[in-house]
Structures are given as structure tokens and as C-alpha cells.
Amino acid sequence: MSESILSESCRTRGLFLLVFLCLLPPLCAAATPPEPDEAFQFEDFPLAEPLEHPTWFKESFLDLRDDLEEAVTAGKKGIIVYFGQRRCAYCQRLMKVNFGMEDIVSYTRRNFDIVPVDIWGVDELTDLQGQTLSERKFSVRENTNFTPSLIFYDSDGKEALRLRGYYPPYKFRAALEYVADGHHRRETFSAYMERAEGSMAFEPEELNEEAFFMPPPYALDRSRLPGERPLAVFFEQGDCHACDVLHSQPLQEPAVEDLFRQFENVQLDYRSPTPVITPAGRRTTAREWARELDLFYTPSIVFFDEQGKEIIRVDSVVQFYRLRNVLNYISSRGYRTEPSYQRWRVNSGF
């Protein structure tokens, strides 16, 4: 068996989901602790004090070609480019929760170098193709709408995985191993995670309901006749703690609920065979559509414009402040003049 963070997790924490990925005996999965609440429940307003990233992040001259060469020479599997902001509460979760766990830190450092990039930085950066531009322009080009964003590059310099936003420890561990063990060369991350989750024979459970969700049938076609309002599609599942947090916290805020009432809203079980006609007019099922969208996290909210084009997606941990800003971006039709959500935030004062 290859050395992996999953086997480490089995020895130290017995994480139920990841046990099935490494095919260890069921006994190891018996004592699965829950994800820490601080991974999901926190105030996401900008931090009062600026955040410092860990000292073990790479001291880089921001030439990604040199960074990758040094990592490979040291026997590592590649590099991770970390896009962050110094007052980002989600970046703080990554540092405090995920990188507060010894097994995650040791596995990350053994397999990757992390190169930090300030999404508002003015320092020059050279990408893996040799193009030189500022940190800020690089961040906009790479569509890092939410921080922290992480782009994994393998030893060949090819993009292996992209994480938009903050993910709890079990999903982050899986992402690390997905790249380090070369699974990205054979399958998508969503397929990789589906194999693991499919190993757990949970009975389907009821989804959380909201009064603003549209009832079936889900005929979402906007290719022939444009919609009157933007569309929000919630991909969720039962037995989902993060889904419970979404419904019990940010969706209970009157400001968020009022904004969602300006949308057409649909909730789908992302592992179900429920019939759907997509905004592009194609007949499929909720499960197949989630696969095509390459979703690997629940809850995910995918937003579409009146013509059925995807605007943005929130497919990572989200709380009130970030969700409200995204809803304002869409409800104000800010995407029509500014496709970069981060730039829109600066220009509009959000």
C-alpha cells in the first residue's frame, strides 16, 4: 500500500469516509469522530487582525517554474499555489483547523511545497508557462473568486486539482491524496469522492426544505425562452452536516432569504435519479448533472443567468457574509459588466 495521509488518518483519527478510499479493514472506521464544528460554524466577516500564513509555506521568489523544479528535486509530488487574503476568515479556517492537524501538515509538507499568493499583491509572478504578471492579475486570470483558493500542479507542471474556497479537513485530506497518489491522472475528483461515498450504504434521508424552493417537475430550460430571474440550483444530500448548517444559519438570516426570493430556486439531491431539464435544455437526472458539473461537495449552489449560462458557483463552506455578497452580485446583475466577482466587490464597495 502506498504511503498516504489516509492510512495516517486511520491510525490517528479513523476517518470513516477516507477508510474506504484506502480500503482498510472496517474495524479502523469504527471510531469516526465528527468534523470539528469550527470548520463550519464561524463568523465570516473580514478579520480585525491580519492573518499570517504558516512559516513552513515556501519563501518563494514567485517564479513557479523554479518552485516546481525545487519541489520535484526534493522528491515531492508537485506544488500548491495558495491564493489568500490577509483578512479572510475562510483562510483563517484553513490555517487554524486544517493546518492545525498534525497529520495534514506532515502529509502536505512531505508531498508538496505551498507557494502563497496575495490576490491583491503587486509583486511580479512568473507562471509555469513563463508569463510574467502581478499577483493580482494572476489571481484574476485564474478566477479565484473565493479565498482561499488552491491550485495543485503535479510534477509535470499540469494542473491536477483546483479548490475554490474553504473545505473541511476530511475533504482536504482527500484532495491531498488524490493528487499525491496520482489519481488525478485517471479520474476526476468528483468521481474519486463518489467511489468513497458510494461505499457507505446510508439510507437516503430527507433534505432540508425552504419555502422559496420550487416544486418538481424541474424543467429549467432557458435556451428557448429566457427566464425572468436568475436561477439558483442547490445540490444537497441527506445526512449532510454542512447542509444542515447552511439551512440553520445563513439561510435563516432575513437579508439572505429576501435576496433568494429574487431568484428562481431549485433543490436537488445530487445522488438521486430525479429527472431534470437543464438550463441548456437537455434532459438528464440530478445525479448525472452533478457529475457533469464536477461537483464534489454538498451543499453546492450553482447560479445561472436568464439565458441559462452559469454565472458562479458556491461549492465550499459558506457563511452569511460571503453568501450575501454573492447574492448581491447576482441580484444587481453585476456579472453583466464585471465577470470577476472579486473585482466587482472592490468596485462596488462590498
Image (cartoon, rainbow, N blue to C red):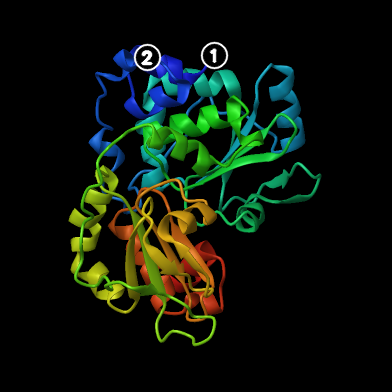
Measuring 38% from the left and 50% from the top, which residue is drawn there?
A: 271
Q: Residue at x 39, y 77 (%)?
A: 331
Mark toward the start of the polypeptide (1 vs 2):
1
User: What is the three-letter code of the residue carrying label 2?
Assistant: Pro
Q: Is residue 156 left or right of residue 25?
A: right
For the image, the number of numbered tags is: 2
Residue 322 in sight: no
Please name the residue that numbered disc 2 is placed on. 25
Image quarter of the C terminus: bottom left
Q: Is residue 339 left or right of residue 299?
A: right
Residue 166 spot, x, y in % from top left: 41, 44
Q: Amino acid at mark 1?
A: Glu
Q: Residue furthest right?
A: 130
Q: Which residue is mark 1?
A: 3
User: Mark 2 packing: few (<14 Cα in 10 Å), some, or many (20+)?
Assistant: few
Residue 36 shows in the view: yes
Q: Are marks 1 and 2 in contact (CB under 8 Å)?
A: no
Location of residue 97 with respect to 235 vertically, above or below: above
How far apart marks 1 and 2 lie (CA) works out to: 16 Å
Q: Residue at x 34, y 76 (%)?
A: 264
Label 2: state its secondary structure.
Answer: loop
